[in-house]
Image (spheres, rainbow, N blue to C red):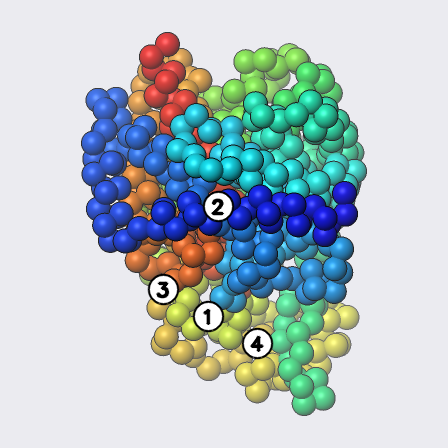
Amino acid sequence: MKKSVYLSALITSCLAVIGCSKQTEVNVPQQASEVAKTVASSNKSSPVFSVDAAKENLTFAKDQYLKLLDHALNERHLHPKPACIEDKTMICVPRSEEHGGIFMEEKAKWTNGFFPGAIWKILSAKQHINWANNQEQTLFDGAKYYQQTLFSEAKRGSTHDLGFILYDSFGEALNYDGLDDANRKAYVEALETGRATLATRYRDEKGLIRSWDWIPRMRIKTIENGEKAIDMYTLSNPWTYPVIVDNMMNLEFLFASDSKRYHEIAFNHAKHTSINHYFYDESDTNKQYPLSYHVFDYGAHKPGNWQGIGNVSAWARGQGWSLYGFVTVVEAMQKANIDLANYPDFHAHLQRVFGSVEHLLQDGYVPYWDFFAARDNAYEIAENISSDTTVFHGVLALCGNSIEDFIKPYEGYRPMTLNASMLSDESLARLKGKESWYGEPVIQGDKLLPCGTKPYPKSHKKIPRDTSAAAIYAAAMYRYATFTKNQDEKKRYSELADKIMAELSTHYRTDRSKNGRPNSYDFGFVLAEATGDMGNGGEIDTPIIYGDFYFIEANVRKIEFQNSLKQ
């Protein structure tokens, strides 16, 4: 079906939503009061966050995504990627709130499965949601429309993110009982093709799925012929076989198959990740709380962080990928098609990882975007570029004019003085004699000054949190609590998840957040104050689609957990 015809039909269907949208508008302070009552009035087994609160959250998410879908289809409040404007045939996908609008992402991006995936999650939980008019049909049509953009991804072997892209969309669709047979068959085939594609990124000699093919480069802002320019510069020691902790989230995609080969790949990847991706904070003298690096280079055999405030820091969402990933590994052990005798004790590793998150969340159930960001010595962590690590991380090139004036990435945020030797000879030659946007030479002797030397404005005050990380923790904890037979673990995991969800529901929904962006609720997002890519100055302190996805999942898993206690 042509895009214009399909859109016309779908927009007509969406018009049925308008009446309901009006009747679901409420006075925000009053609604915040009501949710506090809902969260507080819980049953005995859930002292903080109730099933009723979870169901109310799901109905809210349904109403919001009807709104977001309507805006996207009618091209209201959009901030599209340039490629979306240049190519009129491209179907771009809602991703976040950026530059005062709904940021529409171009094709072939790792987040594109989350928008249809979130809709499929809502549809699959329909028995827990209050519906009106043609809302279910509208969401169904919208999910199918955006799902069609992902078929080609099943053969894209240049990315490890196929679990996010395919399993979190096509896989979610299979849980919806209203999915017709023809689409169900097509979706299953896309998943099978995608698994085979993902497996091509695995190397037996490494025992891991390679994450990235691209070479890390540093973004530096210079003056070229009197004009401001931004260019990328290569490093002197780039990684050669990078694996990021996010990759743990793609293993479930392989576990969902009965293939012994896919199980072998997934368990091998988990094995090497558990051995190499973790460190202990200096204050943790007893080594009780393992923290996950973001990236490990299996070429140079060095750890680091592309995300996070430094190469040895606790990036909050990374700890979520670690926790959730090993939850799926432990669950998969119950139906493994291979002998696990020679593998590490994944269950013990998961308990240590959970203990770390539990320990870190003592300072608040919604973490700063990096758990170390609010430490007094955070700037020292940021500026540590030891040769024992992969050296470069994104924050090294984050200048004050790359982010909004009120955002402070970490305590002590200041322009960095780096060793010029971190850049390749080719890059140093290109930068010779050039000035930065701050009016100072970028190279001064053997030093690299990408952001000048003058202090940043004092307006940089807010260290942002990451609600997407908190939502991932809660979803993972409910999931584990539902299938574990250990009653103590069941209690610890579910109670911490309840506390996280009570905090998110009461203070971080877009209709209740006091510190979020003012248009987030009207745009149709669910969860405020997530942080995406601080190092590149992108998606900071704003709604992001995967934050909504895992928040929706956590509510569904809360209900499933409570129901499991009755069996």
Image quarter in which the N terminus is found: top right
Q: Is residue 81 above or below residue 159?
A: below
Q: Residues within 10 Å of mark 3 (few under 14, many from 20)?
A: some
Q: Residue at x 23, y 24 (%)?
A: 43
- Cβ–Cβ under 8 Å for marks 3 and 2: no
Q: Badges 1 and 2: C-beta atoms under 8 Å apart? A: no
Say which mark, if any, is on residue 404: 1
Q: Which residue is mark 4?
A: 449
Of marks 4 and 3, which one's residue comes earlier in the chain? 4
Q: Dividing the image into 4 quarters, which one contains the C terminus? A: top left
Q: CA distance from mark 3 to mark 2?
A: 37 Å
Q: CA distance from mark 4 to mark 1?
A: 21 Å
Q: 288 left or right of 266?
A: left
Closest to the camera, between mark 4 and mark 1, is 1
Residue 17 circle label: 2
Q: Position of residue 539 (x, y in %)?
A: 51, 58
Instruction: Indicate the amino acid at tag 4.
Output: Leu
